Amino acid sequence: MSDALVLQSTNGPVRTLTLNRPSSLNSFTQAMHAELMAALEAAAADVQVRALVLTGAGRGFCAGQDLADPAVAPAPGGAPKDLGDTVARFYRPLVLRLKTFPVPVVAAVNGVAAGAGANLALCCDLVLAARSASFIQAFAKIGLVPDTGGTWLLPRLVGRARALGLAMLGDKLPAEEAERIGLIWRCVDDASLADEAAALATRLAAMPVAALAATRAALDAGPSVSLEDALDEEARLQSRLGRAHDYQEGVAAFAARRAPVFKDR
Ligand code: T3D
């Protein structure tokens, strides 16, 4: 057993990070935040890494904020903690790190994903979930709003009506239903989750990942920009990508009927 709160492993171009506080369903303490951010920065800086998998140890993916963490837990008789401070110091940078990650990020949701844990998964580019997994916007049950990007992510993913239903009721959404309503990419059998996530990440790693990261950014910006601005941004991105190695390689490989070897990042 490792004491690390975030386990790291590498298989070829795929780095896997595993949240490792299984006894409390991998809920976030400040120490786990620090380890996760350090692991993300290391993966982002390593040019050999071309895809990232984020998963959890044990029977849960992540139960959000550790509600027993003295940094946030209400102390009887004590002054209330400023939760906005925790959000600004830890969850905001985490979301922005994932949303600007240089390579594709796959969430392999192995079990329950609640509160910030649910939205952490939904921040990832492609979300695979085990059939037994579930997603819970647990915030309303403890008098909070969805954070970790939830207010931004949910309506974009499933529309306002479903976003409000999920956020206000805080019900457990089974993985199959999450796939059906478009909250996640796919739900797979529990026994094949790790293999499916590895295969998906390996496939993404062989693709032009710089273009995939730009695709994520453009799609995320899409709903809040005009059609004219979206078209301008597409032109800017094609200008940049069209001058890069991967486009030249992709076209050359197409013409030569061979597999391309992409390397931009
Ligand atoms: O606070 C701020 O800084 C603002 C930011 C907030 C972000 C947030 O994430 S707020 C939302 C926090 N999360 C929750 O409210 C979820 C709380 N957990 C649950 O509702 C349930 O545990 C689950 C539905 C996720 C799973 O239920 P179940 O029955 O499968 O498991 P369990 O028995 O409840 O939990 C197993 C253990 O994990 C248990 O510990 P024990 O009794 O075996 O020693 C439980 O206390 C612990 N655990 C689960 N979630 C948390 C947790 N411990 C600390 N914090 C948790 N969030």
Image (cartoon, rainbow, N blue to C red):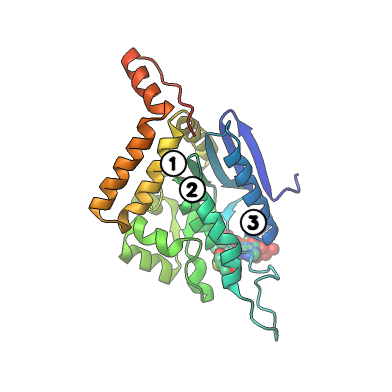
Residue at 30%, 43% in the rendered image: 234
Q: In this rendering, does residue 25 appear at all?
A: yes
Relative to 121, say whether 8 is above or below.
Answer: above
Residues at marks 1 and 3, CA–CA distance in whole angstroms: 23 Å
Which residue does the numbered mark 1 point to in the structure image?
A: 213
Most foreground residue, 68 or 241: 241
**Residue type pointed to by label 1:** Ala
Question: Within 8 Å of ligand 1, the CB of disc 1?
Answer: no
Ligand 1: image quarter: bottom right
Relative to 132, say whether 168 is above or below.
Answer: below
User: Which element is circle 1 on?
Assistant: helix
N-term-proximal mark, 1 vs 2 = 2
Residues at marks 2 and 3, CA–CA distance in whole angstroms: 17 Å
Which residue does the numbered mark 2 point to in the structure image?
A: 100
- Pointer 1 with pointer 2, Cβ within 8 A: yes
Most foreground residue, 172 or 70: 70
**Residue type pointed to by label 3:** His
Left or right relative to 20: residue 134: left
Which residue does the numbered mark 3 point to in the structure image?
A: 33
> Which quarter shows the N terminus?
top right
Label 1 vs label 3, nearer the camera = 1
Residue at 40%, 65% in the rendered image: 166
